[in-house]
Amino acid sequence: SRRRQLALKVCGWVFHSQQDDGFEQYLQMLEKLGKYEEAAATAIWNMDLERCIEALTRGGEAVGPQPDRDDLSLLAMALAGYPQSSASGGPPKAWAQMCTRMRPQIKPPYARAILTFLSSTSTREFSVITKDPRIALPDRLAFALRFLDDKSLGQFIEEETMDHVERGDLRGMPLTGLTPLGVILAENYVVGSGDVQTAVLLLSLASPRLFVEPRVEYWL
């Protein structure tokens, strides 16, 4: 839907599909930053298995501090044997069982998420991905927007929003927006960190232009 597409752009997914030029540019940007597993996950979540394997292979061969290099190479080899012909009907039982056994051995969170995604037989199993705090919120949200139904997506957004608000985690601002709920999030952030300046810089974009918030005026 248009709303989901707009939300994906907020998550950084400014492309529409793997055929979009922006898709490859986004993956290359992640790889240049050394985020090979993130690039691989983004590729497979956009149904591009070949590009996923390519990113994992590059990660396994990368020069420099890559502590999980062997895990990425192992996963690349495992995915090379993925039975694409049966993708529409779900993975064969033997292949899914192999992934289940392999998953505890794979440490990088995005790499484990790739295994979970490809070996799942039901969208209910996707909660392992959406609830993993080691995966960045924009990526978990993008995944949820792509694969969860409306009810599950709404529940995920509500739970994540309240969690970020209660903890005063500014990374939850894309969920609250510059709204009164966002003010509560910022207030909890200030209470926990003492950093008033960051909160004011964020909320000055909305108050008083969109709404009047006494707390913002007080912080100023």
Image (cartoon, rainbow, N blue to C red):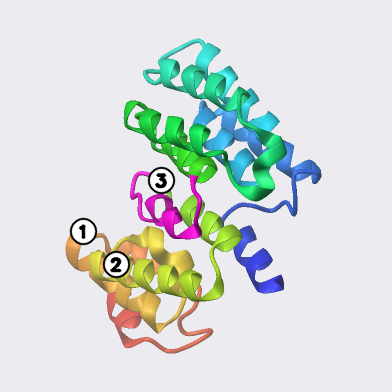
> At x 32% / y 65%, what residue is drawn?
164
Segment tinted magenta in the rendering? 120-135
Label 3 to label 2: alpha-carbon separation: 15 Å
Q: Secondary structure at mark 2?
A: helix
Residue 186, position in %: x, y?
32, 70
Q: Secondary structure at mark 3?
A: loop
Label 3 to label 1: alpha-carbon separation: 23 Å
Point out the residue furthest to the front here.
Answer: 93
Q: Quadrant of residue 134?
A: top left
> At x 57% / y 34%, what residue is drawn?
40
Q: Looking at the rendered structure, which numbered label has been put on residue 193?
A: 1
Badge 3 local density, few (<14 within 10 Å), some, or many (20+)?
Answer: some
In the image, residue 24 sits, relative to residue 61, either above or below, namely below
Name the residue carrying label 3. Answer: 135
Say which of marks 3 and 1 sits in front: 3
- Left or right of 174? Residue 199 is left
Q: Quadrant of residue 1?
A: bottom right
> At x 28% / y 81%, what residue is drawn?
218
Q: Who is closer to the viewer here, 11 or 140? A: 140
Look at label 1 and name its amino acid: Ser
Residue 21, position in %: x, y?
80, 42
Q: Looking at the rendered structure, which numbered label has been put on residue 163?
A: 2
Look at label 2 and name its amino acid: Asp
